[in-house]
Amino acid sequence: MPPSRISLRSRVYRQLDPRAWAAGGLSPVNKLLVVLILLATATAIAETEPELYGPYGTWFDALELLFGLLFLVEYGARLWSIAEDRQDGSALARRLRFVFSPSALLDLLVVAVTLLPFIGLNPAMLRLVRLLRIARLAKLGRMSLALRRVHSALWLRRYELGLTVAIGVAVIIVGASALYWLEGDLQPDKFGSIPRSLWWAVVTLTTIGYGDAYPISVGGKIAAALLAFAGVGLIALPAGIMANAMQEAMRREPAGEQAD
Amino acid sequence: MPPSRISLRSRVYRQLDPRAWAAGGLSPVNKLLVVLILLATATAIAETEPELYGPYGTWFDALELLFGLLFLVEYGARLWSIAEDRQDGSALARRLRFVFSPSALLDLLVVAVTLLPFIGLNPAMLRLVRLLRIARLAKLGRMSLALRRVHSALWLRRYELGLTVAIGVAVIIVGASALYWLEGDLQPDKFGSIPRSLWWAVVTLTTIGYGDAYPISVGGKIAAALLAFAGVGLIALPAGIMANAMQEAMRREPAGEQAD
Amino acid sequence: MPPSRISLRSRVYRQLDPRAWAAGGLSPVNKLLVVLILLATATAIAETEPELYGPYGTWFDALELLFGLLFLVEYGARLWSIAEDRQDGSALARRLRFVFSPSALLDLLVVAVTLLPFIGLNPAMLRLVRLLRIARLAKLGRMSLALRRVHSALWLRRYELGLTVAIGVAVIIVGASALYWLEGDLQPDKFGSIPRSLWWAVVTLTTIGYGDAYPISVGGKIAAALLAFAGVGLIALPAGIMANAMQEAMRREPAGEQAD
Amino acid sequence: MPPSRISLRSRVYRQLDPRAWAAGGLSPVNKLLVVLILLATATAIAETEPELYGPYGTWFDALELLFGLLFLVEYGARLWSIAEDRQDGSALARRLRFVFSPSALLDLLVVAVTLLPFIGLNPAMLRLVRLLRIARLAKLGRMSLALRRVHSALWLRRYELGLTVAIGVAVIIVGASALYWLEGDLQPDKFGSIPRSLWWAVVTLTTIGYGDAYPISVGGKIAAALLAFAGVGLIALPAGIMANAMQEAMRREPAGEQAD
């Protein structure tokens, strides 16, 4: 079909909505948007570093203004082209539905946190805005069909994963109580109360082991060894569940349909 | 069936016993009890922290009194309504069986440790009582049908899990002996005897690695590297066993029957 | 069959050899031997601790003498009763085969390291003997039919496990080389040569992370992050292999035949 | 077939090319080459250590000269015998194809970095050359048919593994942002910017936990505990994927065909 017979709005819609792109994978415009989002996230991370923002601050501001305008154009184009969507109701109804959809609200937030500092903002707010710019990474969620299916697979296993987390929390509370009892007097700043012991118990059960808190008495070490063994057993539970969920999610989605 | 024709005792029994609730999941009263148990556990954890108990001690005491009375009412209601249970023997026989069942003894312990401090107790006992209040978390066990089935699945695999633990303990003893031999003279406070080396071996095999004890000689580091590799291999064993057990437990229990 | 018609030697043989015990599981004598071996191992561990051996040295020596005599009696009983074994050749041939079998040589070593200190031994040898007493744990190997089958299952997967270890070693060498290049001048005592960097690489890839060596430059941290990600991926490999091997070993051995 | 009727070039070719060796496994010459490569890698690792190179420098140089000449002979023999390969084109065309193949370019690089120091090289270059000698380990890749098949199995799962890495990177960025927000003012050298926090987030999510950076405030510890739980869940994802990929790779390659 000759491109002259398809309206510009329809072509923009097909480029922007991943479900409307017939060729499979991502459209060229969406591929560019993925690169833009990754660049904007990297910029947001880099500009929190004083050693980088200090000497190159004006360049970062210019880059943020550019990202803000590009995301504004993207938002406008989505708002304009959504009328091509095959939903019930008038073009206005579709646009209203779009405006209040979670992904469009996220888009608007991204535009706001990118452009707000240029309107004038006090320094305290600036830091929060700088942090919220990391949220631009969440815009990628729209692009990935696979992510959505993995999410639904995990949703089916939410009960198993929840049970594992519940057992883990119970083991952590029991372990923290034991160390509070055994070492509360020896190291009061680390095990002087159960809330203080909880930090040690989490760091031990997940086998991280920073080394800022550890038992020094024989009884405390025996209790810690039991918790460590429980940790190895508990880490095994989500491994099995996630392996099953992953396997199921991949069986539902053959390699040929993947959005990449 | 009109509610007027069912006795109050029967209705209380159906609300309290998870197996007697026909609608599936937990009854409204049991859902409230789950929330109450979680709140009481959080309170017991928080009140061990001097920075919280110091300024808000009277509020915590009032909360504990409330929890104690509510758990007393729960115990009384269970004792009264258990006569509705379809077991052999008289109502008295059923009540005696209930009183000496593990979960009822736990309930009585929970009531005791919650209310005892208000009768008068010396400070040394108070700390133990405060710790035993964490045991209220164990009351949740009655609510979870799924937990009971996972437990029975693990029971079937007890031999495999026991063998894994036995291999792990043997590897820890061999590793601790090697470091005692190689670094016993270099770091006598950490590797001067096998019992002292055992702590290092447990922390290494479970890949926690606090950093309070580690080898400093070339020979000790080579032995530690071998133990670390064994640790990665041994952690893999329970992962496989638990994955199988979890899969089997979930196959036996379809999602629709879950108690939540 | 009346016990009077079976010779004492035959009854001793049935008690001692796990394969000759018809009832399944371990014979009463072998169960006692398992307890004895575990007690002897715990004693050997405890007596290396000066704080325990110092005040209770004579008690430990008496216990060791007792263990030594009991293991001597066990060795003698095995040597005497092995003539009942249904192997070709004369009773003498069976006894010679037994004397030079690995498990009998281990038994003799155990008797030797337990009784030698009482004959008279210089202190330097004493320490080695004390360590070798841990080898008594290996006597348990004879008791476990399941361990032998798991071992043969792992033997079938030796190629996969070997490949995993080879990939792991290669990744460790590459990681150590990278840190030697990036931080050799910054921390010469930790990364000043590849052999020195290897210790850090092993501790990182196995996710132990003692904290005695870690990169401090940006380049070193990026290289360490890549190694950490590789570590998570590599730990996953033996988990899959061991899960399969464990599953297969358990399929071959039904629960009813287990030796426990 | 009598060996006298096969040309020397053909016999050399069969010895050197793993695919041309009919008997299965590795040919005697290739087995010798494997040992040579492992020895050369161990030598390259050892000679970076000043305490070894200092006293034994001339021995290491002699060993390197020997390795260089042997690898030169191997390269020449491969170049000469490749004419026996059953590919289209003249012997010259086959040799040109071989010269520009990745494995032959690697061989040439190995010969160069081994022999270059003997021609005369400034000290700065020497260190890089010494590091590049580790690349000799990569020569082993040609020998392993199994490695190639595992590689192709992982290539089929590249999308799943990529998605896991992407989720991991996103979780790390979110965790680092949270700690930058919560502890940026408390520990500015560790959490003063998101790039600085990223190091902590990687070390925590992979459960390494060196202990050089950890949260000290209540809010930071809660955020770290959530990241630690996410880490346990995320480590489970590649475990499942790799287990499946490994299983599939082993099903395709029966034990009897393995190159060992």
Image (cartoon, coloured by chain):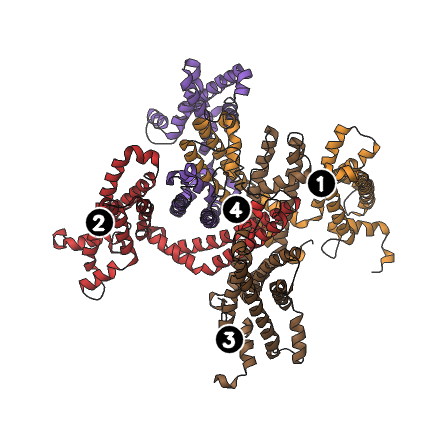
Chain colours: A purple, B red, C brown, D orange
Q: Amino acid at mark 4?
A: Val
Kindly tell me whether residue A192 is visible in this rendering. Answer: yes
Residue B72 has which mark? Answer: 2
Residue nearest the observer in this picture, B210 or C155:
B210
Residue sitting at x 23%, y 44%: B118
Label 2 resides on the chain identified as B
Residue sitting at x 40%, y 42%: A184
Q: Secondary structure at mark 4?
A: helix
Q: Secondary structure at mark 2?
A: helix
Q: Secondary structure at mark 1?
A: helix
Give the residue at mark 1. Answer: D45
Give the residue at mark 4. Answer: B203
Q: CA distance from mark 1 to mark 3?
A: 57 Å
Discs 1 and 3 carry the same chain letter: no
Q: Amino acid at mark 3?
A: Ala
Q: Amino acid at mark 1?
A: Ile
Give the residue at mark 3. Answer: C22
Q: Is residue B85 above or below residue D107?
A: below
